[in-house]
Image: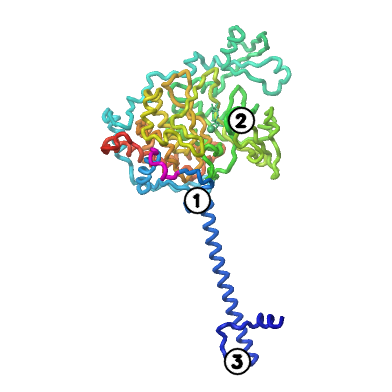
């Protein structure tokens, strides 16, 4: 005990002088010096520990977010983007080729990183990209030649006079095909019994478009000038004339080659209706993987609602595949604007709106979905609905405390007015965590597609290439099917439907989305012209940002997603140039392998 105390109070260091002075003052002095040395050592050790700890933290964070680029996959058998095992893969071939060049020349590197703290705040204008070094004058020249009637035989760029989307020998509308005018749609019907029982609530409208069906059911001629016509039949129905809604007029004007004309004023009118009209009824949409609601407005107008789940700067989870990614309501809004700006006009109008979950959803809905509403521990009003993905308490959609933002997409015509055909996308992904699709394994996959109707003639393949460019710009990997209007046959545009999984990764450019362009090496003159216009003129990011400023939930996109558009345009132009170079000067053993 004693020895311990002594040793503790005056430790004798190894290097203590052999003949230490014996008087008390000197000993005290010596003890003080030793104490200081001990303190210094402790301080040094502590600092070293802190430095090491900080370093460990940084390394740890980088591993978490994948900055270091050496992330270990959770499942050893899942090898995404592993270049070694895919010698035969066409995708890897073009990936290697295009990235080799683009890495150095245009800054469109493929990389992933964590979201920076910057958010899409207010009106802050982001830096405009520096003047592009490469104006793609070679591609511009081809366009000029083609407009002069030359360069007709360009192996890649399809000149306007060979493009059925540009030529449009005929471009009938749904109204013309069905022999319907908006005036004829101005009749709505409802059951008498129902309306007598509940005069103030929403009647189950028989949509005006069903006039023809009613004619068939009741074997009567509807006099459209009658204010009220009562039918006696199995059920009693009251029909009355109302003004055709903007959406009905829009639907009748949908044409064989585009959803709406450039500058169509009904687009703005529909967006306004969906923003300001009262919501009369809500129900969950059957089918589909994630929650969607069907919104009823007055006059039979309907919209497809997708709820906001995350803030704008939340990106696709690194370990989520494209098929398990959440849908983003703002992606639907942005994609509509982008589709319009690019001149495709193949996406239905979509607008953002903040609704009161109590009065505009809960009070006007019925059925099983009601049982899924609850108040969260944070006192927010939530619901989750019923669907196959993310419809449970753990993935509920919550208001703040009961105000909820969402996207409202104008409804397509019902099937009794214009039936749609659903097509399997030839470049569909495997939707499996380990399997690959055929197009990823077969380098001449486009030859197979090209020889199969309806891709062997007409506009269809060019439409899919447009769609791949559109999807590459937005980062949408979820294109398993696409739809067309049956009545127009095969020579019609492909609808740009379901963009919910776009705009998920702002710092990663998913080159495989461009596979149709890269494997077929064909593009419309008009599409190339639009891309060049934005690349060399006012950047696409600016035009899109300005267009979306009118939306009630502006800012719609996180700035890095907008910046990505300008970067991705360069990659597309680079790919087109590569195709031209390759087809004009094929290497002896690469004639058939353009990718
Ligand atoms: N604006 C619209 N009006 C009417 N119907 C629509 C509209 N948009 C989409 N639909 C229909 O709803 C279906 C499901 O929509 P959407 O694809 O957005 O949902 P989803 O949950 O992502 O479905 P999936 O998982 O099958 O892709 C579409 O296939 C389409 O037929
Ligand atoms: Mn979908």
Ligand 1 visible in quadrant: top right
Residue 266 placement (x, y as % from top left): 51, 26
Magenta-colored stretch includes residue 532? no
Quadrant containing the N terminus is bottom right
Residue 21 numbered tag: 3
Where's residue 300, x and y in %? 60, 22
Left or right, 454 with respect to 320, comes to left
Distance between mark 3 and mark 2 Cα atoms: 91 Å
As displayed, is residue 532 above or below residue 300? below
Q: Say which quarter of the image contains residue 366.
A: top right
Please, is residue 221 above or below residue 203 in the view? above
| Residue at mark 2 | 293
User: N-terminal of the two: label 1 or label 2?
Assistant: 1
| Disc 1 from disc 2: Cα separation | 38 Å
Does dot 3 land on a helix, a strand or a loop? loop
Q: How is the image coloured?
A: rainbow
Q: Is residue 537 visible?
A: no
Q: Residue at the spot x=52%, y=30% of the render? A: 349
Q: Which mark is residue 272?
A: none
Residue under pointer 1: 71
Q: What is the secondary structure assignment of the residue under circle 2?
A: strand
Quadrant position of the C terminus in the picture: top left
Q: Residue placed at 63% from the left, 29% from the top?
A: 284
């Amino acid at each position: 005990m004693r020895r311990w105390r002594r040793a503790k109070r005056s430790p004798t260091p190894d290097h203590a002088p052999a003949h230490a002075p014996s008087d008390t003052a000197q000993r005290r002095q010596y003890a003080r010096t030793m104490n200081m040395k001990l303190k210094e050592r402790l301080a040094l050790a502590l600092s070293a520990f802190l430095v090491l700890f900080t370093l460990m933290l940084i390394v740890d964070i980088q591993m978490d977010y994948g900055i270091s680029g050496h992330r270990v996959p959770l499942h050893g058998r899942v090898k995404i983007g592993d270049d070694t095992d895919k010698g035969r893969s066409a995708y890897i071939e073009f990936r290697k080729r295009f990235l080799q060049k683009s890495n150095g020349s245009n800054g469109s590197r493929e990389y992933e990183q964590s979201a920076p703290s910057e958010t899409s705040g207010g009106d802050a204008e982001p830096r405009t990209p520096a003047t592009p070094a490469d104006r793609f004058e070679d591609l511009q020249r081809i366009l000029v030649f083609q407009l002069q009637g030359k360069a007709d035989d360009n192996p890649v760029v399809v000149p306007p006079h060979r493009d059925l989307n540009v030529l449009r020998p005929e471009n009938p509308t749904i109204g013309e095909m069905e022999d319907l005018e908006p005036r004829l749609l101005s009749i709505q019907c409802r059951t008498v019994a129902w309306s007598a029982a509940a005069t103030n609530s929403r009647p189950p409208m028989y949509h005006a478009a069903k006039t023809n069906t009613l004619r068939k059911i009741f074997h009567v001629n509807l006099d459209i000038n009658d204010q009220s016509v009562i039918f006696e039949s199995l059920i009693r129905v009251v029909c009355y004339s109302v003004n055709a809604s903007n959406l009905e007029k829009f639907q009748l004007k949908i044409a064989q080659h585009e959803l709406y004309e450039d500058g169509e004023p009904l687009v703005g009118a529909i967006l306004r209706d969906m923003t300001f009209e009262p919501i009369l009824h809500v129900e969950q949409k059957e089918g589909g993987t994630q929650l969607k609601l069907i919104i009823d407005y007055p006059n039979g107008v309907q919209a497809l609602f997708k709820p906001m789940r995350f803030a704008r700067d939340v990106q696709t989870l690194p370990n989520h595949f494209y098929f398990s990614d959440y849908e983003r309501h703002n992606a639907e809004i942005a994609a509509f604007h982008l589709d319009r700006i690019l001149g495709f006009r193949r996406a239905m109008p979509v607008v953002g709106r903040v609704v009161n979950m109590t009065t505009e959803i809960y009070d006007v809905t019925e059925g099983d979905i009601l049982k899924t509403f609850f108040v969260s521990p944070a006192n927010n009003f939530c619901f989750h609905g019923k669907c196959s993905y993310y419809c449970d308490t753990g993935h509920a959609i919550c208001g703040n405390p009961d105000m909820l933002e969402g996207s409202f997409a104008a409804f397509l015509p019902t099937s009794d007015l214009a039936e749609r055909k659903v097509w399997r996308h030839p470049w569909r992904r495997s939707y499996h965590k380990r399997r690959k699709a055929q197009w990823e394994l077969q380098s001449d996959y486009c030859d197979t597609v090209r020889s199969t109707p309806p891709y062997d003639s007409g506009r269809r393949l060019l439409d899919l290439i447009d769609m791949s460019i559109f999807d590459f710009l937005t980062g949408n990997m979820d294109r398993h099917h696409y739809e067309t209007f049956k009545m127009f046959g095969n020579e019609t545009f492909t609808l740009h439907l379901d963009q919910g999984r776009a705009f998920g990764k702002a710092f990663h450019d998913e080159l495989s989305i461009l596979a149709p362009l890269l494997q077929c090496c064909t593009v419309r003159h008009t599409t190339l012209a639009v891309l060049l216009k934005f690349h060399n003129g006012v950047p696409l990011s600016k035009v899109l940002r300005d267009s979306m400023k009118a939306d009630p939930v502006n800012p719609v996109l996180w700035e890095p997603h907008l910046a990505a558009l300008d970067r991705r345009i360069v990659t597309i132009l680079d790919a087109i140039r590569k195709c031209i170079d390759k087809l004009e000067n094929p290497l002896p053993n690469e004639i058939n392998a353009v990718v």
